[in-house]
Amino acid sequence: MIRLDDVQELVKPELAEFKRRYDEAIKTGKSPIIDQVVRFLAGKRGKMLRPTLTYLSARLLGESNERTHFAAVVVELLHNATLLHDDVVDGSDKRRGMPSLNAIFGNKISVLFGDYLLANSLLAMLECGDTRVFEVLARTARRLAKGELDQAARSRNLDMDEETYYRMVSNKTGALVAASCVLGGLSNRADESQVEALRAFGEALGVAFQIQDDLLDYTGKESILGKPVGEDLKERKITLPLIHAFAQSDSQDVREIKRMVARPKLGELRKVARFAQERGGVDYARQRAREFSAQALQALEVFPDSQVRRLLHDFSSFAVERTH
Amino acid sequence: MIRLDDVQELVKPELAEFKRRYDEAIKTGKSPIIDQVVRFLAGKRGKMLRPTLTYLSARLLGESNERTHFAAVVVELLHNATLLHDDVVDGSDKRRGMPSLNAIFGNKISVLFGDYLLANSLLAMLECGDTRVFEVLARTARRLAKGELDQAARSRNLDMDEETYYRMVSNKTGALVAASCVLGGLSNRADESQVEALRAFGEALGVAFQIQDDLLDYTGKESILGKPVGEDLKERKITLPLIHAFAQSDSQDVREIKRMVARPKLGELRKVARFAQERGGVDYARQRAREFSAQALQALEVFPDSQVRRLLHDFSSFAVERTH
């Protein structure tokens, strides 16, 4: 079993510096509300998965440098802005096992603080001073927003095929994970083929990661995951386990299950989860996550074997083995 | 009485081109929800005040060019993103006299479409390809977000002094109006003193414009303004007319009026409005708006007299004379 701590060990000094810079980027000292929110969020820093990928990708090609730090900060700002808006959009009152910002400060402050993080990510980009970095980020931001819009628009639509699911997951998670890797590489002057390899690695890794996340909604324990099991289903989100189970079932069964998803009740959602499990949806999703993870590894083969590459391999394994 | 149409006449071809480019920037052809929202919003284009300022500022120094068009599009994208998020944050169901996006498509889509506009503004900035432009925009976006946060945080706080009011108005409206002018100038290689003059002009004009806007909440007609009179008061927004009236009154009167604002009832809000009027708050706000407008004009004196400069003068008069 791979532990995230072990993967992050090599870039521990970078991550410490990252925290300092991230906090520096968003504090003002002049706005009481911003300082309050910053203090609140400081207690709930995530696992820094994206910055870790940025630093490891940079280290494939040399040492971390100023541009790597800026890239890591920009990516995390963009990611956290997205999370704040997501929680408002989904009405989620938990995030990382603790009350979400919107649960404590309300939707207004969450929407606006998300915008504030976005604006700060612009300023950090500016300090990067590299048009290419900026281009990657602008395109990523657009894919993210488009992905979220497509997902929100589908929220009442229970017809979802596997292809649409992958496209949405790819826009939602693949895009930013890919950007994290690409920007790390660019900070050490990666050439075209290296950029493409990092993009392909991040994209596949992001999809693997998201499939696993969706899977944990069926199999995880609330206490570990920090989000109640079945949360996606309660929000009528149809993910891979159920998509596959539907594809294995006759239309009457599908209709019956969709009826339960359409008006979610707790007892019935257990039935839905069992249905996904029994029709092989859970196993299938697990297998697909591993395939994407393997695809990610393959993309890295343009880089010579090294300790850093092995850590990125471990990261991919972690993404699909984790139970939280 | 100055008509906006007359001010815009000179840059009519630019504004036509602007519309084309703006629509081009946000359409996708691939996402049904985006296309739906784009069609909805196309029917409610604003008065293009900011693009008008961008083009006129550029024309102070030469002809409009590619960079001017990009700047105009970026500014309007940023502005419209802010409006969408504002309407969600304020729970407003009207905008420009018609149902707001959130009233029709819900808060989710509004928040996410705002993000989508922001992402597109990044892409447009990228095409500008000028670090200076980018810096102006990043700083503007941050001031906007900070201003909105400070305002939201104060929403239950009825203690507001004139200085705080100007600071908030300046962050909320002055910042982006100033950016519109500065970017227009930069598109024609304005030098430092010209940039500073355009910044000062835009900043003062924006504040004048916003004071007038707040004033119209006391004096305007719903049918013209497209927003019900007293809307700010209903949201417990204390603006200049009331701030000034408070400063002229003894603490018992102030307490009584604040009690009415704290739990707004229609009949009582009329009393509040009358109080602001009778204590000279409406006249005072009108006078201050004119002073800011005059200050804006003065900033333009570094430019030689010309038709364009006279149109910018007219724009400043329009800002404080308009009744809607």
Image: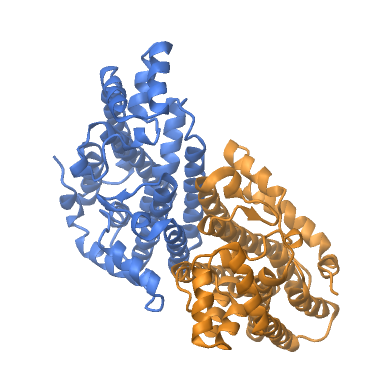
Chain colours: A blue, B orange
Position of residue A14 in the picture relative to residue B89 (left or right): left
Q: Nearer the viewer, residue B270 or A217?
A: B270
Location of the C terminus of chain A (image quadrant): top left
**Most extreme residue toward the left, as rendered?**
A1
Location of the N terminus of chain A (image quadrant): top left
Q: Nearer the viewer, residue A149 or A18?
A: A149
Q: Is residue B241 above or below residue A319?
A: below
Counting from the top left corner in percent of width and height, residue B105 is at: 57, 43
Counting from the top left corner in percent of width and height, residue B286 is at: 70, 81
Q: Is residue B102 above or below residue B139?
A: above
Q: Is residue A190 visible?
A: no
| Residue lying at 66% horizontally and 77% vertically, measured from the top left | B202
Q: Is residue B2 above or below residue B23?
A: below
Counting from the top left corner in percent of width and height, residue A19 is at: 28, 65
| Residue lying at 86% horizontally and 68% vertically, measured from the top left | B6
Q: Is residue B312 above or below residue A46?
A: below
Position of residue A3 in the picture relative to residue B240 (left or right): left
> How many numbered circles are shown?
0
Q: Nearer the viewer, residue A14 or A132?
A: A14
| Residue lying at 35% horizontally and 32% vertically, measured from the top left | A233
Counting from the top left corner in percent of width and height, residue B160 is at: 50, 79
